[in-house]
Image (spheres, grey):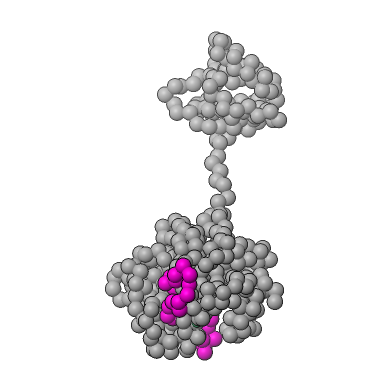
Amino acid sequence: MKKLLSVILLVAMLAVPFNGTVFADDSQEKEDYLVMFDGPAYNGLLNAFGVEGGDVVNEYELLDVAHLELTSDQADGLSNHPHIEHLEKNAEAHKVNQTTPYGIDQVQATEAQNQGHTGEGVDVAVLDTGIDASHEDLAANVQGGHSVFDDAENSDPYNDGDGHGTHVAGTVAAANNDTGVVGVAPQANLYAVKVLGNDGSGSYAGIAEGIEWSINNGMDVVNMSLGGPTSSPILEEFADLANEEGLLVVAAAGNSGSSLGWFDTVNYPAKYDSVMAVGAVDENNNRPSFSSTGPAVEIAAPGVDTLSTVPGNDYASLSGTSMASPHVAGVAASVWAEKSDLSNDELRQLLKDTAVDLGNEDHYGAGLVQVLDALNQ
Ligand SMILES: [Ca+2]
Ligand SMILES: [Ca+2]
C-alpha cells in the first residue's frame, strides 16, 4: 500500500482535479485523522480530495490505513466516500504515569500490594500541617480531619499551606491509580490533623490536642513527623494515653543527627517509651547524617529524597526523618488490616522482629521495616 499511495500522491501533485470533487480550503486549519480504506485500489481518491504529499504523516504497512492531515471539509468529504472504511480524528493518549518511589519497594510494599495488602479500613491520623484533600492522589483516602487552630489561615485541616503534611500523607497512602505516586498502604484512611500551622510550626499544646482528637475519633495509627528538643511530661501523658487506648503512635526520631552519630539526639515525642521513634536511611540503607541517633531509635525507614505528594496536584522529593516515619505508619496500617487481632504492642514488636538488621542500634534501631515479612510472620 505504501508504494501505491506514494504513486497516488505523486499523481495528485500533477493531476488536474476531476469534476465534482472537493478541494482543500487553505484557510481551514488542518487536523490529524486516521483513515482506513477498503483496499489498496483507491486511485485518485486522495488527490481528488486535494490531499497533498505533505499531508500524509504516515502510511501503515500492515493495514490500508493512513495518518493524514485534513481540513474539516476534506474529512467530511472522505468520510462519506464509499471506499473509506473508517475516518476518525487522531485521539490523544496519555501514558500510564504512576511512579513508585524507591522507598515503597525498599519496605516491600510493592510486593505486599501485589498480594492484596493495601491497609484498607485502617485509620491513620497524620498530625502535621494539614493534608490537601483535593489532591488527585489523596482525595479518595482522606476521610476526615481537624485543626487545632482557630485563625482563618489555619483553621481548615485540608489547607496545607506548608506542604509537609500532604507529603507525609502521600507516603502513607497515596492511591494506587494511574497517576502520581503510590503510598505504602494505598487504601488506608487518612485523617488530616492539623497541629502545625502553614508556617510549619506549632506547639506541644496543639500536638496534645491532636493526640486527644485521635483517641476520641477512633484512630488506629498516629503519625507524628514532628518534634522538638524539649521534654514535656504532659505531652508524654497524652502519648502514653494513646498507647494505653490501643493506638500505635509513630514519630520521626528527629533531624538533629551528626555524621558520626555519637550523641543522643532523638527528639520528643519520639523519645517517649510509648512512641515508636523512626530513623531515616537512604536508598542503600545508610543513615544520613541528619537522622537523630540514640537508644530511643526503634526502627528505620527510607527518608532521603523521598518522592511524594504536595499541594496542587504536584509532587516533590523531600528528605528527613519526617519522610521515614510515614513509611512505618503505612507498614503498620497494611499489617494491621490483615492481622487485626494484634494489639498495638504486638504489632510494634512484630515490626521490630521482622526488620532487616542494619547494625548500630542507636542509629537504626531494629533495622529497616519490612511489610511483607511482617505479614508473613
Ligand atoms: Ca497514584
Ligand atoms: Ca520511643
In the picture shown, does residue 83 fall above or below 185?
A: above
In the picture shown, does residue 48 fall above or below 363?
A: above
Q: Position of residue 373 (x, y in %)?
A: 67, 72
Q: Position of residue 263 (x, y in %)?
A: 45, 77
Q: Is residue 343 visible?
A: yes
Total labels drawn: 0
In the picture shown, does residue 98 fall above or below 363?
A: above
In the picture shown, does residue 134 fall above or below 241?
A: above
Q: Is residue 333 visible?
A: no
| Residue 265 part of the magenta-drawn span | yes
Question: Predominant secondary structure in magenta?
Answer: loop
Q: Which residues lie in the magenta part?
A: 243-270
Along the line of sight, the residue nearer the viewer: 21 or 130: 130
Q: Residue at x 56, y 20 (%)?
A: 53
Q: Residue at x 64, y 20 (%)?
A: 5
Q: Residue at x 39, y 70 (%)?
A: 129
Q: Residue at x 64, y 69 (%)?
A: 117
Along the line of sight, the residue nearer the viewer: 327 or 55: 327
* Quarter containing the N terminus: top right
Along the line of sight, the residue nearer the viewer: 343 or 139: 343
Q: Quadrant of residue 231?
A: bottom left
| Residue 343 part of the magenta-drawn span | no
* Quarter containing the C terminus: bottom right
Q: Position of residue 197 (x, y in %)?
A: 34, 71
Along the line of sight, the residue nearer the viewer: 112 or 134: 112
Q: Residue furthest left?
A: 151
Q: Position of residue 288 (x, y in %)?
A: 49, 65
